[in-house]
Image: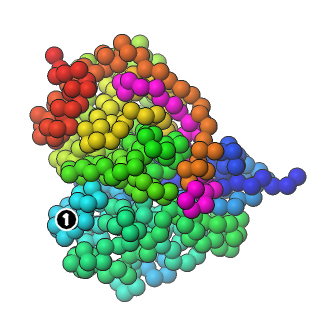
Amino acid sequence: MSATDATCGIDVGTQGVRASLVDAEGRTLGSGAAPITSDHRDGRRHEQDPEQWWTALCDAVRQALDVAGEVHVTAIAIDATSGTVLVERADGSPAGPALMYDDTRAQGFADRAQRAGESLWSSLGYRIQPAWALAKVLWLRGEDVLGAGDRVVHQSDHLVRRLVGSVVPTDTSHALKTGVDLRTAAWPADVFAELGIPLELLPGVALPTTVAGVVSRSAASETGLTTGAVVRLGMTDGCAAQIAAGALEIGHWSSALGTTLVVKGSTDELVLDPSGAVYCHRHPDGGWLPGGASSTGAGALRDAFTHGEDLGRLTEQAAGLGVIPGGTYPLIGRGERFPFVAADAVGFVGGHADSDAARFAALCQGIAYVERLSYDVLASLGADTTGPVSFTGGPTANEWWNQLRCDLLGRPVQVPREPHPSTGMAMLAAAEPGRLTETVASMVGIGRSYSPDADRGGQLRQGYAELVTALAERGWLGSQAASYALAEAGGVPR
């Protein structure tokens, strides 16, 4: 029997790596996953060991290949967390731990970076935040940890280099938070000169789907992938989820719910947000992909239930409780980046949750409230958010939560047949430059559909309005966004 051609997508998340092997029709032939256990958080610090990324990648890919059986892998693409960087030695080895996407030790450098490129950033809708990679590059230079021949690279760049065995460019998607000029797909030389960043400190830049190289013999030996298989430049994890959702056509939107929540869509024009909460990736086929990544998400459930609670059982119990009163903001740690920017934001629970099931329901509702606020903020900036919405991410396995989110959004929702960022990367790996939208449209299948329940949507909007009001009163949510959201929710809370 001849081997089936397949493409491989690799998703490098906060907690682990997932690999998917997909055929030409978008069907998953095999998948695998491996944990990342080197995660270290301490105040504003968030680090991981890059060597464990590679180990987990190899484990996940080998699992996927074992499940798939006889396949011939023709192309590979990787997505990773947005804003995660590391110092890489001249030989490609990591010089130390990576600074993760929400590490904010570079807080003092964000304003400097913003001032230096104010005109360019404003034209692109950027506002440099403490967690952005550009601020981290400046911090690393200030820490005097860079040696001769060292470079600062993104998480995906490092792993792509491990696959092909040579220096590779970065893609415009992962480079966004490092200050790339998306219109020219190049580093802004004048701005970087003012900041004292030599261009050779960073990799070159190319568009997603660009061929970075082919799988080396060494990498093939470690991963089980086919020697000589094409490796294409990927996109960030949020964009990978958007691809898996099939939300690349103009007017389509996706909500990717994992440890954090990422909302993204597709528009003809740039969506400009003076606050910096919303920013646009460049669509590889033309146009823009606006959205943002929240610091809230399903990680709040993992943080709240640490003693082996049965979340399936809690879901059954929560479903019987109805809507929990109050507006809960389920933020882990300090600081929010979307749908508003507030460095001092902290989570809170509105109302009274007197049992594990009620607390679980309140947190699920709170995450849905942040999701709804994300769409309202985008709409307040002029984006048309009335088009189709798709859900992706691990929590889509929870039917009750899917329906609750659909009810609050008040619009039909679809869950793709294969709702994983790794699937999105496998689809990107199959696409020639300029044909990503076309390729994805031919590969995405719809698994489940939901229609909103207007009655429960109305009940949920009360808690949503209470959360919006609380966020505005704390000074975290701007008045324009708050007014728009409250008007869409039917007015101020009682």
Query: Which amino acid, mark 1?
Result: Glu
Residue 332 found in image quarter? top left
For image coordinates 26% across by 78% down, the residue present is 190
Residue beneath the point at 39% across and 55% down:
281
Q: Position of residue 91 (x, y in %)?
A: 49, 81
Extreme residue in the right direction: 1
| Residue 432 relative to residue 194: left or right | right
Neighbourhood count class around disc 1 (C-alpha, 10 Å): few under 14, some 14–19, many 20 upward: some
Instruction: For residue 241, say whether it is visible.
Output: no
Q: On screen, 347 above or below 156?
A: above
Residue hosting label 1: 118
- Compared across the picture, whether 464 is left or right of 86 comes to left
Residue span colored magenta: 408-435
In the image, farthest residue toward the bottom: 148
Please tell me whether residue 157 is drawn above or below residue 390 in the rendered image. Answer: below
Determine the secondary structure under disc 1: helix
For residue 436, which quarter of the picture? bottom right
Q: How many marks on residues? A: 1
Left or right: 166 as drawn, with respect to 333: right
Q: Per the image, is 416 magenta?
A: yes
Percent position of residue 434, x then y: 55, 59
Q: Please identify the quadrant where the C terminus is shown.
A: top left
Pick the front one: 491 or 471: 491
Residue 364: image location, x then y, percent: 36, 28
Residue located 45% across and 82% down the image: 90
Tell me if I can see residue 368 in this picture: yes
